[in-house]
Image (cartoon, rainbow, N blue to C red):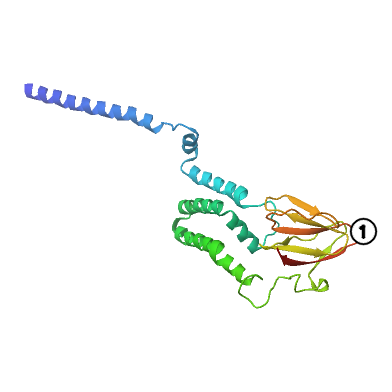
Amino acid sequence: MSWISSKSRQTARIQAQLDRKQAETTEAGPSQATSKKTGILGRLEDKFGPKIWTILLALVAAVICYFGIYSPSWENPTLAEFVNRCRDNWLWVLIFSGILYFLIKRIAGESAKTLHGVLLMALIAIFFALPVWFWLVSPSGSGGTKSTIPLVRELPVAERPKLVLPPKGKSKRIPVPQGMHVVMSGEDFRFHCVYQDGHEESFGAGESACSDGNMPFVYATNNREKEQNIVSYAYATK
């Protein structure tokens, strides 16, 4: 009997120890599960999960793209204008590309490697391949036997490209290659200069020309109220 009683007490002690451990585990579990991270980013991660970082990276990329790369002066930009803009703002383009790299890594899955390759090829094209190509086909480049850009020195006024202006209307925007300026010929029109930062200047017959600056576009407006106008244009080197 004494042996049975001793065995029962030993079993009771073991069971009591197990009950205490289970109670400690139960008390610690909920406190760990319900622990909240501090700070704004910590609370956002608690609420939305790890995907909040992807959302924030996308927002930062959009802000950089708009304020660092996009220009309010753009209106259906050509490929050359887009490349020049990216090269002028190369630091923002690289930051944007780095964020895009991490976004692809987080959300693209098995396609990430392919998309990273596309991103790298796009950067090589923007900063190296396309500028070389544009230089080769430009009038000042060594490539090509004949210019595709109408030049003042090569064309009389009658043979230059024409801009048709509706009554009190404006022409399309004419891109201005680096190192060149646009010469317009005609009557009753106003010459407008669009600068890289988005602001504009204009002048008419007998007025001072636009001030020097980074000017990616120009266009003309018609001073005639009831009839269309035709203005010719060509390029000249500065």
In the displayed structure, 53 sits above or below 216; it is: above
Per the image, label 1 sits on a secondary structure element best described as loop
Quarter of the image that includes the N terminus: top left
Which quarter of the figure has residue 160? Answer: bottom right
Amino acid type, mark 1: Lys
The residue that appears at 60% across and 71% down in the rendered structure is: 136
Residue 20 or residue 222, whichever sits in front:
222
Where in the figure is residue 177, as x and y percent of width and height? 67, 63
Residue at the (58%, 48%) spot, across then down: 64
> Circle 1 sits on which residue?
226
Q: Is residue 84 visible?
A: yes
Quarter containing the C terminus:
bottom right
Task: State which quadrant residue 140 falls in.
Answer: bottom right
User: Is residue 1 shown to the viewer in this render?
Assistant: no
- The percent position of residue 46, horizontal first and vertical second, equals 46, 36
Q: Nearer the viewer, residue 193 or 61?
A: 193
- Using residue 170 as the reference point, say whether residue 20 is left or right of it: left
Classify 10 Å Cα crowding around label 1: few (below 14), some (14-19), many (20 and above). few
